[in-house]
Image (spheres, grey):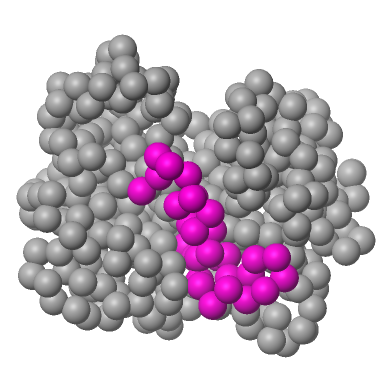
Amino acid sequence: MALEAFQKSEALSLGVELELQLVNTHDYDLAPYAHDMLRLMARRKLPGSVVPEMTSSMIEISTGVCQSPAQVRGQLVQIRDALVQCADKLNIAVIGGGTHPFQQWHEQRIYDKPRFRQLHELYGYLSKQFTIFGQHVHIGCPDADSALLMLHRMSRFIPHFIALSASSPFVQGQDTLFDSARLNSVFAFPLSGRAPFTLRWNEFNDYFDKMTHTGVVSSMKDFYWDIRPKPEFGTIEIRVFDTPLTVHRAAALAGFVQALGAWFLQEQPFMPSEDDYLVYTYNRFQACRFGLDAVYVDPSSGQHQPLREHLLATLDQLERHASAQGAEESLRLIRRSAEMGHNDARWLREQFESDQQLAETTRQAGQKFRV
């Protein structure tokens, strides 16, 4: 089975998806209110979409096609405001974060949708453990071969994306000591990890054809890669971000991706190779475990350095491109995070250290999402 043709999209256009938590306002545990939220949200005229996710205590929102991080932020703010109003009517709260701090996976309900039921039959308890929450960023590519080149260049910055968005330090009531524990759950799936190294769409098509011939996959949705091409949109989709605690941070992360994409397209700063992936899993682990305090191994030189140093040097390279794309504010937020070593995982830990109650930490995260 051949892949569908790679559709045309405007280079560097953006789309953002956020998976969000629905919690009750009694003890701030997850609450199975997805159906009610979707019913209320369907009455609103909003950009993008609001759809169910794997379990009934989560929903996914998405923007339309955007040209700038400011447009992403504007659409996300509209959707967030509507979500908050609908949640208030139901006496629940909507929050960000990559994991709920103390929910028990076995209590979750699979949302009643054929694909989710099929995944539950295939993956068993992993499907309920997939009650985790991520941000996906789509970036438009001029053509199919450019998309694969963009994908493998972006792969060098997977640790940066993870560290900046990390917001999942707590799982099942415990501090995991990871900044992003969410990605450990993703790694449990057999078709997760990295995409195969191909730089020509016809070669990728051959790979996809072989995979479908085995019966293991039937569409691109079956791949849980960190970055995957989305031919129906003409984009690549970056999937390693934890859902941030605010839509403003989500928009800033999209702006960082767009500035990187502009740098790649306009300056062609390096050529990726299969050797880039020698240190890929190590760098990924470091970012998940230590966040912005991680060590980064440069795949081309083998040099070890603090991830924050590499991030700040990258931001220096991106300043001109950020200005051209209207992403200056995004990069200012990213730079402040890098300089302070502060991400949402640190904020959540600080709240817990102050209150010593994960329910209160979750309540505070709900308040943070509203503004």
Q: Is residue 267 left or right of residue 32?
A: left
Depth order, front residue of 4/216: 216
Quadrant of residue 295 in the image?
A: bottom left
Does 111 appear above or below 126?
above
Quadrant where the image shows the N terminus: top left
**Residue occupying image coordinates x 56% and y 45%:** 18
**Residue occupying image coordinates x 23% and y 26%:** 207
Q: Which residues are magenta?
A: 164-193
Quadrant of residue 238 in the image?
A: top left
Quadrant where the image shows the C terminus: bottom right
Depth order, front residue of 165/49: 165
Q: Is residue 157 left or right of residue 288?
A: left
- Looking at the image, the residue that sits furthest to the top is 1
- Where is residue 343 shown, x and y percent of the image? 50, 72
Is residue 189 visible in the rendered image? The answer is: yes
Is residue 361 one of those drawn in magenta?
no
Depth order, front residue of 31/233: 31
Q: How many marks?
A: 0
Does 245 appear above or below 326?
below
Is residue 46 visible in the rendered image? The answer is: no
Quadrant of residue 353 in the image?
A: bottom right
- Where is residue 124 shown, x and y percent of the image? 63, 39
**Residue occupying image coordinates x 26% and y 67%:** 315
**Residue occupying image coordinates x 13% and y 76%:** 303
Is residue 187 one of those drawn in magenta?
yes
Depth order, front residue of 324/144: 144
- Where is residue 89 shown, x and y percent of the image? 89, 44
Does 226 appear above or below 350?
above
- Where is residue 26 shown, x and y percent of the image? 92, 61
